Image: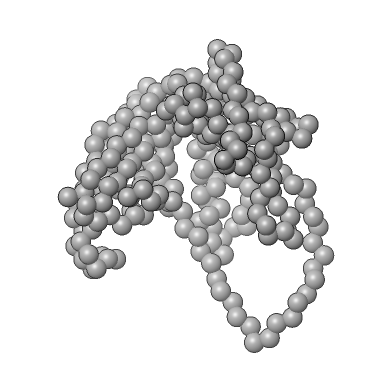
């Protein structure tokens, strides 16, 4: 079994109480707003999207400002451009219902908004293949009063490639929001079997698993994002994740995806 680096995201917080309180105005500097990009390509038709917004002010708790008038294009290595149009039902989200990414390809993202241009590139490997899902019974008393299941996903790494992976899981349609990411640095070409720890799985549950292959830039973004989430109140000062987009926050990642589902007994 090869090493698959699993990183779990957890948000820690501290609650402080005081016997008396006083409002103090601190002269904070207003930072310039930055463009935030979440650009995701997938090898299934209609499942790719780009979400655009702006960072907020330290004095404004109304949330991110969405961008609805951008020109968004994804161009493949053969020069074929696909326009992603704004979805009026989801402000800030851009879609291309007929687009599907292909394996062993390169893609360029171009965004024009407010007279500014943002660009990024992403590449794909072959489509990964989930071999199987299996499970073991976990008796009551191990974090649950009921008998639960520990689900394992299994696949074989492609020896001809340097691969970076992410696993995503859903139980009865509810997403497991932990980060399960890893590479094949110490196990190129070997079989991997690893569990989904972050979701309680019970009898009759339907569990859906995705195995995603990504390029190194996307992996670096997700790794640094996860490190920030996991830093906790006593960790290093969080910084913006390492991005592959010029002059913006976020990332452009094109994934090759395989899926598998199981109904627990």
Does the rendering let one see residue 94? yes
| Residue 84 % position (x, y) | 59, 28
- Looking at the picture, the colour scheme in use is one colour
Q: Among all residues in the image, which is located at the extreme front?
A: 89
Q: Among all residues in the image, which is located at the extreme bottom?
A: 19
Relative height, residue 165 to residue 175 (above, below): above
Residue 224 or residue 151, whichever sits in front: 151
Choose top left, top right, bottom left or bottom right for residue 248. top right
Q: How many labels does the image show?
A: 0
| Residue 149 % position (x, y) | 23, 54
Q: Is residue 173 left or right of residue 93?
A: left
| Residue 32 % position (x, y) | 78, 48
Q: Among all residues in the image, which is located at the extreme top?
A: 78
The residue under the point 44% across, 26% down is 45
The residue under the point 52% across, 51% down is 227
Choose top left, top right, bottom left or bottom right for residue 182. top left
Relative height, residue 25 to residue 6 (above, below): below
Relative height, residue 82 to residue 245 (above, below): above
Q: Is residue 31 left or right of residue 78?
A: right
Relative height, residue 79 to residue 86 (above, below): above
Q: Is residue 189 left or right of residue 265?
A: right
Image quadrant where one finds the N terminus: top left
The residue under the point 54% across, 27% down is 96
Does the rendering let one see residue 185? no
The residue under the point 57% across, 40% down is 89
| Residue 240 % position (x, y) | 63, 47
Residue 216 or residue 136, whichever sits in front: 136
């Amino acid at each position: 079994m090869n090493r698959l680096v699993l990183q779990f995201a957890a948000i820690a917080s501290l609650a402080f109480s005081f016997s008396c309180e006083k409002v103090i105005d601190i002269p904070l500097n207003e930072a310039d707003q930055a463009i935030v990009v979440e650009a995701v390509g997938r090898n299934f038709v209609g499942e790719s999207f780009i979400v655009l917004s702006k960072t907020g002010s330290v004095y404004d708790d109304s949330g991110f400002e969405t961008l609805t008038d951008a020109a968004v294009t994804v161009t493949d290595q053969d020069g074929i451009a696909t326009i992603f149009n704004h979805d009026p039902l989801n402000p800030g989200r851009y879609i291309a219902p007929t687009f599907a990414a292909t394996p062993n390809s390169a893609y360029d993202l171009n965004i024009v908004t407010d007279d500014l241009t943002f660009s990024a590139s992403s590449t794909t490997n072959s489509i990964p293949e989930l071999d199987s899902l299996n499970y073991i019974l976990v008796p009551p008393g191990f974090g649950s009063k009921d008998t639960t299941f520990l689900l394992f996903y299994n696949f074989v790494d492609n020896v001809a490639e340097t691969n970076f992976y992410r696993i995503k899981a859903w139980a009865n349609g509810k997403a497991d929001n932990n980060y399960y990411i890893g590479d094949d640095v110490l196990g190129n070409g070997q079989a991997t079997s690893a569990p989904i720890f972050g979701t309680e799985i019970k009898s009759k549950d339907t569990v859906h698993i995705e195995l995603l292959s990504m390029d190194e830039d996307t992996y670096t973004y997700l790794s640094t994002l996860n490190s920030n989430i996991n830093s906790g109140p006593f960790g290093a000062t969080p910084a913006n994740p390492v991005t592959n987009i010029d002059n913006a926050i976020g990332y452009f990642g094109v994934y090759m995806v395989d899926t598998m589902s199981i109904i627990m007994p």
